[in-house]
Image (cartoon, grey):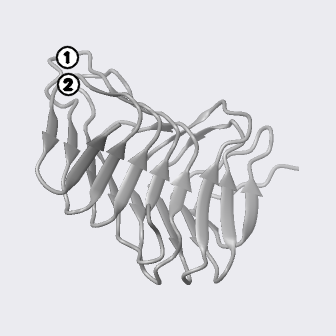
Amino acid sequence: GANTHTGGTTVTNGTLMLGATGSITGALTVNAAAGVTAIFDNNSRPTVLTGGITLGGADTAATPRIINTGGAGSITLGGDILFSATNNPLGGSIAAPLDLGTTNRIITADDSSSAAVDLTISGNITAPASGNGIGLTLTGTGVTTVGGSITLTASGDNSGADIAKTGTGTLNLNGTAIAFDDFNHSDGTVNVN
């Protein structure tokens, strides 16, 4: 039968995979227990969160991951994304398409001493073409690598469709980045590959 809940979802060990008709709401936390890899598999579902995503771990051998078996579907954000460096886990990764949803979003990668790259996002990042556009800020003290594309569009005057880089960390852009308004770089390092 169907399993439902209305709160957040936390994965600490093993893999939580959505079924063919499965869904979650609330916030998504992948906080790997000591020495293990914890995985949330979106499994090509059209997931719509009412909260954000937090990745972290309990020790220096913990690895938090989000994957997307099948490659379809997406995760629509209801909040921001954080990779937490508390306990210095290995780097976190999100290998699923991300929809920013209805308002500006912030992706923060803190600096873990156990990770050369703190947060890797290999899925494409998009925002709906509504109004003046949705903006994206990438920040934190760690290293973020975006391997997919970033596409921010708008149906109005485009004034909100900005990509911003703040914080002292490093941003590696390995895919195409399209902001229908501005790219604002105020701190840290940006590598465009």
Going by the numbered disc 2, the residue's amino acid type is Asn
Q: Residue furthest right?
A: 1
Q: Nearer the viewer, residue 26 or 180?
A: 180
Total labels: the figure holds 2
Coordinates of residue 118 in the picture (x, y in percent): 43, 63
Callout 2–callout 1 Cβ contact below 8 Å: yes
**Does residue 60 sit above or below 105 in this rendering?**
below
Q: Which mark is residue 187?
A: none
**Does residue 119 sit above or below 46 in this rendering?**
below
Would residue 167 be found to the left or right of residue 22 on screen?
left
Q: Residue at x 33, y 59 (%)?
A: 108
Coordinates of residue 104 in the picture (x, y in percent): 27, 42
**Does residue 113 sit above or below 155 in this rendering?**
below
Numbered disc 2: secondary structure: loop
Q: Residue at x 28, y 63 (%)?
A: 140
Q: Residues within 10 Å of mark 1 (few under 14, many from 20)?
A: few
CA separation, marks 2 and 1?
Answer: 5 Å
Q: Which mark is residue 132?
A: 2
Numbered disc 1: secondary structure: loop
State whether residue 89 appears in this view: yes
Residue identifier under label 1:
156
Coordinates of residue 70 in the picture (x, y in percent): 73, 34
Q: Nearer the viewer, residue 139 or 54?
A: 139
Res 110 → quadrant: bottom left
Would residue 80 be found to the left or right of residue 32 on screen?
left
Going by the numbered disc 1, the residue's amino acid type is Gly
Coordinates of residue 77 in the picture (x, y in percent): 45, 45
Q: Residue at x 18, y 22 (%)?
A: 158
